[in-house]
Amino acid sequence: MPCVLTGFFQSLALIPGFSRSGSSITAGFWMGLKHEAAARFSMSLVTPIIVGASPCLIHSLYVNYFPT
């Protein structure tokens, strides 16, 4: 259940003005985590997003700057 709550809070970042890391840290506080643990958890959640988005970004840069 804590993961579902954190995921819900991160989905709020789709609304302009909501911070993904801020909302997941807040969810961590509500789950009883201390400040440092909540911040580490929030920052560790971004790793899969960066790894997944990197190939798309690299492809986009390649297509735009090295047209065939």
Image: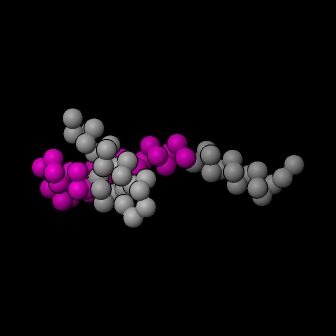
Q: Residue at x 36, y 60 (%)?
A: 18
Q: Is residue 44 visible?
A: no
Q: Residue furthest left?
A: 32
**Range of residues picked out in magenta:** 25-53
Up-down: is 55 above or below 24? above
- Quarter of the picture containing the N terminus is top left
Asked if the magenta segment contains residue 27, the reply would be yes
27 sits to left or right of 32 = right
Q: Could you tell me which residue is drawn at 32 percent across and 43 percent down? A: 7
Whether residue 39 is in magenta: the answer is yes
Q: Is residue 4 depicted above or below 34 in this figure?
A: above
Q: Is residue 25 visible?
A: yes
Magenta-drawn stretch, dominant element (helix, strand or loop): helix
Q: Horizontal and vertical percent for residue 68?
A: 87, 49
Most extreme residue toward the top is 1
How many numbered discs sit on the rendered protein?
Answer: 0
Identified at 42% across, 47% down, the residue is 47
